[in-house]
Amino acid sequence: MNVASRLPESPAAALADRATDAGKPPFLGFGLGLRHQHYDEILNGNPPIDWFEVISENYMLPGGRPLRTLERICERYPVVMHGVSLSIASTAPPNFEYLQGLKDLAKRVEPKWVSDHLCWTGVHGKNLHDLLPIPYTKEALDHVISRVQLVQDFLGRAIVLENVSTYVQFNNSEMTEWQFLSELSRRSGCWLLFDINNVYVSAFNHGYDPLTFMNGIPADRVVQFHMAGHSHMGTHIIDTHDHPVCEDVWDLYAAALKRFGRVSTMIERDDNIPPLDELLAEVARTREIAEQVLPAGGQAR
Amino acid sequence: MSDFARQQAAFQSGILNGDETVLAEILDSPREKREALFGVYRHAYGSRLVEAMRNDHELLHLYLGDEMFDEMAHAYVKARPSTHPNLRWFSQGLPEFLKSAAPYSEHPVLSDLAALEKALNDAFDAADGPVVELTEMAGFAPEVWSGLTFRPHPSACRLDLATNASAIWLALKNDEAPSEAAALDQPARLLIWRQDVTPMFRELPAEEAMMWDEAANGIPFGVLCEMLATYDDPDNAAGRGAGYLHGWITAGLLTEVSIGS
């Protein structure tokens, strides 16, 4: 099915475009996801990492060591907040208690930006703690755009949304994921976190070319790359974030640099956390490849 | 209900209840059937929550072993789906679940172990607050001491256990073989708190537990000492009270001492 041919035309929607280059998040360099296993080594060693991404929910807590450590990290490194529970695509009513917690943390951290995922995590008062897929329909797009606008208004800043790894596709989709993301960013003004591993995973799982996805994303809306590992199950890939980045994803990263230019990039490991040195080697590789692909002065478009 | 909302409800029901309705709206992939692909979400749901419970209840996990812990955890996941966006709070209901759900309710040590671990987890990331120093106490004239009232540090909490769970916890923590679970004649009165960034607990004598509980209720020092006099030798009740107070302050347990009205 050529879903692209079913992309609805919506001239009225263009009037609502919020996309603008104003306030575009800065290029931070080459970073790493902060994990508690590395707290002491980072604070005692000042490793050569340009910036850290922190999981927002890990610090949406009353007090104690997590917040104290985060404050010390923030004194030394630029920090970006990355959430997993915004549930921006949920049809449940917005959770203002969660949003207030996120806003309070952002006030404390002063992150370079706040991101989450294009997904939902539950309805009817339940939370499944997973990044669940959506149908790429006009109805879903309108719903998510209104939610993004609400969240951006509440937080007082444009947010950044990430493409998730998916294992299923819905038969009522009317457009591709990349068309959905592009429209979402253009009409809501949110920026995009382009997870290169997730594109690889979803492309394998659904049988399309990851380069087609990449080339369908507007280059000027991407402000961050994620690089991560996964688990190959033969007929499908599961996005486990518990392995080093695989060679295919490194190749896709080089292609992404050619398309998107200079973009803040980070290594994201969520499980089977290795010694910091192993992750630093992967961070160094993101930097080396960028230097090879983008000669000095390479800019994001 | 919109079509999108209906579809999300069906998807969620497919994960939580094994309902297969949503499969009619999902495509097979080029290499795999939709049932297997949707199964990734079903499996991830249970395993992610059980993993979170293993992290929150490391010693209960050690005590029960992988198989029994996971069976218990899956029963909890089934009985109490998560309602909070932050996974941190998912296992908060575990002590109460273990106390009320068979067969776990037949082994009260399980609920007690879970309650102790929960209390320590809660102390770990409880709100920060000022910590009263001993030097501040010197600023109070002797005549105002009987009117002094105390505010516990936000991380402090009391827990009474009916079993020897705290001894079992300590043995497990020290890689020693735990003793047999046993009911106690008198409950173990524990005080749990965070000193600097480290969660701590200790068992209180009955009269110190009473004094702490009443101090936390705002009862002034003079009255607390009168209450202590009913527990043991009335002649040195004030001395015992001052001793307990000294211990609380050096442990960082108080956030404010003030002169009552």
Image (tube, coloured by chain):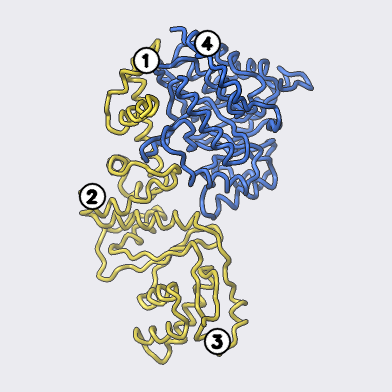
> How far separated are the C-alphas under marks 2 and 4?
50 Å
The kind of residue tagged 1 is Leu
What percent of the width, then of the height, locates residue A157?
Answer: 63, 38
Q: Which residue is under mark 4?
A: A209
What color was chain B assigned in the picture? yellow
> How far separated are the C-alphas under marks 3 and 2?
51 Å
**Chain name for mark 2:** B
Q: Nearer the viewer, residue B47 or A4?
A: A4
**Label 2: how many residues lie within 10 Å, few (<14), some (14-19) or many (20+)?**
few
Closer to viewer: mark 1 or mark 2? 1
Residue at image position (62%, 44%) is A41
**Chain name for mark 4:** A
> How far separated are the C-alphas under marks 1 and 2?
40 Å
- Label 1 SS: loop
Rendered view: A188 above or below B102: above
Q: Nearer the viewer, residue B7 or A106?
A: B7
| Viewer can see residue B231 | yes
What color was chain A assigned in the picture? blue
Residue B27's tag is 1
- Label 2 SS: loop
Q: Are marks 1 and 2 on the same chain?
A: yes
Rendered view: A187 above or below B198: above
Q: Nearer the viewer, residue A172 or B143?
A: A172
